[in-house]
Image: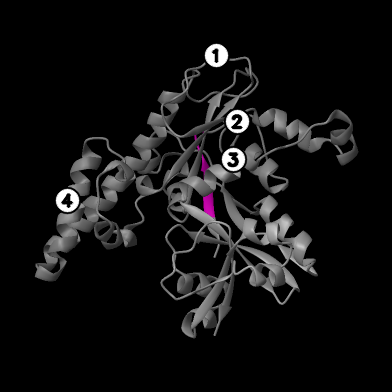
């Protein structure tokens, strides 16, 4: 199971450059709007010191980290929900992502056009959020109209939830800010509301421009500086003691997506990291590894990664009684090393 994160924002804020340093892929970058039309896709391995530590003990033939997919989406502009700047096409790309990395311009460069005309993180956020909200409102109006025509009592529950959301969105609330029960969230899952998606704001700074940080979940990053580091050879980086250090950003994506990592050891041949949603049960985790593991699940053996490291081997961990046998309803914990029994 992999999760996708859409990188978006206004034009010329550093989206494609961020995508480039994350994925190490070459992309078209220019100082004018709409250099990116079709989205760029890239798979990024998630760095995890725990995977390396487990591998040192097991000494497998293969080490496989878990991954996140990043999607470089073209810049949105005011009026995108009406189709301005190919907005409908770009909003559709966001709809297909699990989360949003919204890049905000807080650098001053006269050679790179600033479509907002000023440095203002909060104003940029408001422009993008307004476009996402207007698109959600359009989806809500269309969906409510269709359901009302059906006059079916069975859809009354869904209709009432959509009307509740419409009221909040009309007041400028993101869907994620509207208080919804878990069962209500499941009821509206099919609509993939844009403002229901978790957002991490990336403030792209030049380290000299003053700005006020928004009171939202965000990271401050000098994307151009990281691009310059990427352009250096490994030897030059080592000599200058420079690192890209994107761990905080990837960890931030994990956080907003509500994800954890678990590990499997395949007969000593492969140590592998997997991604699951917090609260996933053992049987569901089995399905992430292989569909047969979920269908034929009997039990699983689980040990915390640190307990395994401290024991020095699976054999010693077993002797110490640190490996537990769990059933299908066991709630997976971040850092679990698990073996499925079918």
Picture coordinates of residue 131, whole percent (x, y): 37, 38
In three-dimensional space, the C-alpha distance between marks 3 and 1, rounded to whole angstroms, equals 22 Å
Q: Please say if 106 is above or below 324.
A: above
Is label 2 in a helix, a strand or a loop? loop
Residue 6: say if magenta: yes
Residue 32 numbered mark, or none: 2
Choose between 168 and 146: the one closer to the eye: 168
List the residue tagged with mark 3: 249
Count every numbered label the image shows and give the total: 4
Q: Is residue 33 above or below residue 150?
A: above
Would residue 245 appear left or right of 289 to someone viewing this image?
right
Identified at 73% across, 37% down, the residue is: 244
Which residue is denoted by mark 4 in the rendering?
A: 163
Q: CA distance from mark 2 to mark 1?
A: 23 Å
How far apart are labels 4 and 1 at the CA level? Answer: 42 Å
Mark with earlier residue (4, 1) = 4
Find disc 1 in the rendering and name its residue. 210
**Within-10-Å neighbours for mark 4: few <14, some 14–19, many 20+:** some
Query: Dots 3 and 1: beta carbons under 8 Å?
Result: no
The answer to which of 40 and 182 lies nearer the viewer is 182
Answer whether labels 2 and 4 touch (C-beta < 8 Å).
no
Q: Does label 3 or label 4 sit earlier along the sequence? A: 4
Q: Report which quarter residue 323 is drawn in.
A: bottom right
Label 1 near label 2: C-beta < 8 Å? no
From the viewer's perspective, is residue 149 above or below residue 128? below
SS state under label 4:
helix
**Of the residues tagged 4 and 1, which is closer to the observer?**
1
Q: Which residues are magenta?
A: 4-10
Give the secondary structure at mark 3: helix
């Amino acid at each position: 199971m992999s999760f996708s994160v859409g990188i978006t924002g206004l034009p010329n804020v550093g989206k494609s450059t961020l995508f480039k340093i994350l994925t190490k892929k070459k992309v078209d970058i220019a100082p004018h709007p709409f250099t990116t039309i079709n989205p760029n896709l890239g798979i990024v391995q998630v760095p995890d010191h725990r995977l390396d530590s487990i591998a040192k003990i097991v000494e497998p033939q293969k080490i496989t980290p878990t991954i996140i997919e990043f999607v470089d989406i073209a810049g949105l502009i005011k009026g995108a929900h009406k189709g301005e700047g190919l907005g409908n096409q770009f909003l559709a790309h966001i709809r297909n992502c699990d989360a949003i990395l919204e890049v905000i311009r807080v650098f001053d460069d006269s050679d790179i056009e600033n479509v907002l005309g000023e440095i203002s993180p909060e104003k940029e956020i408001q422009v993008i959020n307004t476009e996402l909200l207007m698109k959600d409102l359009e989806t809500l109006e269309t969906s409510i109209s269709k359901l009302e025509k059906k006059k079916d009592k069975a859809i009354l529950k869904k209709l009432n939830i959509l009307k509740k959301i419409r009221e909040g969105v009309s007041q400028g609330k993101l869907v994620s800010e509207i208080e919804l029960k878990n069962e209500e969230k499941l009821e509206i899952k099919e609509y993939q509301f844009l403002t229901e998606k978790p957002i991490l704001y990336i403030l792209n700074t030049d380290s000299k421009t003053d700005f006020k940080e928004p009171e939202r979940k965000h990271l401050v990053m000098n994307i151009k500086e990281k691009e310059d580091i990427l352009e250096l050879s490994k030897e030059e980086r080592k000599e200058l003691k420079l690192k890209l250090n994107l761990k905080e950003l990837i960890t931030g994506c994990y956080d907003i997506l509500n994800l954890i990592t678990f590990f499997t050891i395949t007969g000593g041949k492969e140590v592998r990291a997997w991604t699951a949603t917090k609260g996933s049960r053992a049987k569901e985790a089995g399905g992430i590894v292989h569909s047969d593991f979920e269908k034929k699940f009997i039990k699983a053996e689980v040990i915390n990664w640190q307990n395994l490291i401290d024991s020095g081997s699976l054999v010693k961990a077993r002797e110490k009684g640190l490996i537990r046998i769990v059933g299908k309803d066991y709630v997976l914990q971040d850092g679990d090393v698990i073996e499925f029994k079918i």
